Amino acid sequence: MSAFRYRDGRLFAEGVALAAIADEAGTPFYCYSASTLEANYAAFAREFPGALIAYSVKANGNLAVLKTLAQKGAGADVVSGGELRRALAAGIAPGRIVFSGIGKTAPEMKLALEAGIHQFNVESEPELEALSAVAASVGMTASIAFRLNPDVDARTHAKITTGKAGSKFGVPFARARELYRKAAALPGIACVGVDVHIGSQVTDLDAFREAFARVLGLVDELRAGGHAISRADLGGGLGVAYRPGETSPSLSAYGTIVNRALAGKNLALILEPGRAIAADAGALVARVLYVKDGESRPFLILDAGMNDLIRPALYDAHHEILSVNESPDEGPNESQGALVRYDVVGPVCESSDVFRADCPLPAMKSGDLVAIMTAGAYGAVMSSAYNARQPAAEVLVKGSRWSVVRPRRNDDDDIRRDLVPSWLSA
């Protein structure tokens, strides 16, 4: 159940009115619900007892979000040294961290080895060789799983599909046996598992079934070849509902597929959910700057832009947009013609800066607030300072308490980060 609900016509996050946060913290801001983060993680922990639930830090790497999950026992899936440092700073045990990603550098590998992480998910032969060299140089052994590309269509958006042949991710399935043999002969490498991740926002469970069957079907052959395969990292990517009435895959149905795929294999399970934990825990709250007449519909111009939430521009992603101060259940009814259909846009100088076209809302005016929903994943973490616009602040709510967990950057501080060469400073 969503933590964002109307009370007496006002939109709340848990026990805090979003308008009250806006008055004090300013807009735009991301608001995260701690109870939703905790409940979503707990659902995975119940469905997969004993598994390592390695939350995908790339979905939302705010330290307060990570610490909320760490205190409930979450591990972490990281794709950079920076994400590793964040996970460690949040109190996630190194032995519950897996390191994915196709571009790990030697310093990042060394950092992870010395931290004592659980596993590297290796995505290429050159990476394997580099990891071996780094591990040998520090006298350590890297536990690895190859990320195998099963050539399975996740049937999601092309830009977030990662398991098809031709994708930059993973190693070709046909080379798996050869690469495991090579890895076993290298110093500083222990082959302990298999890994697969076919994409994000996957709603067709048959895609998971097909990918898991192909990758796990290799385990017996690898063991017969002398590899001590004891772990299966089945990635993440489980989709969520972004539209009212939209049905997302049930966690229990997903669990059935995972457990059937693992049956009889005697493998420790690793999962890497990100969106499924963080997406519905967050909303982006923005203020209306102007209502501008348009040829077909009025434009609702917000003080948030695509620099704050790029998903609609990048993926044509849908986000519901709600009025913060007027409940659709208690306010005007669309069938009575009282709602207005707006093109909701941001101030960034790009035609793609559109949050949603033809969006029904109560009649809005300058100063009103809206909430862009299901924005807890791939929102703030993908933000930028494009157009020299400082990204939205971030806020965490817990019951009736709230706190700014990442303040909005200051323009002057941002300018001071640039260094003017001596020949221009005279």
Image: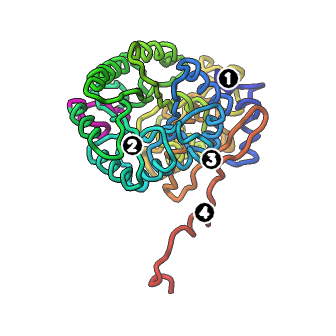
Q: Which part of the image, by quadrant, shows the N terminus?
A: top right
Of callouts 1 and 4, the N-terminal one: 1
- The amino acid at mark 4 is Asp
Residue placed furthest toward the bottom: 426
Per the image, the residue denoted by label 1 is 332
Per the image, the residue denoted by label 2 is 101
Which image quadrant is residue 281 in?
Answer: top right
Magenta segment range? 158-174
Q: CA distance from mark 1 to mark 4?
A: 40 Å
- The amino acid at mark 3 is Leu
Is residue 293 visible in this depiction of the protein? no
Q: CA distance from mark 3 to mark 1?
A: 22 Å
Image coordinates of residue 62 in percent, x first then y, are 59, 44
Determine whether 301 is above or below 110 in the image.
above
Of 334 and 179, which appears nearest the observer? Answer: 179
Which image quadrant is residue 219 in?
Answer: top left
Image coordinates of residue 309 in percent, x first then y, are 52, 42
- Look at the numbered disc 3 and give the secondary structure of its residue: strand
- Look at the numbered disc 1 and give the secondary structure of its residue: loop
Q: CA distance from mark 2 to mark 4?
A: 33 Å
Of callouts 3 and 1, the N-terminal one: 3
Of 43 and 414, which appears nearest the observer? Answer: 43
Q: Which mark is residue 289?
A: 3
Determine whether 211 is above or below 125 in the image.
above
Of callouts 2 and 4, the N-terminal one: 2
Q: Crowdedness of circle 2 by 10 Å Cα count: few (<14), some, many (20+)?
A: some
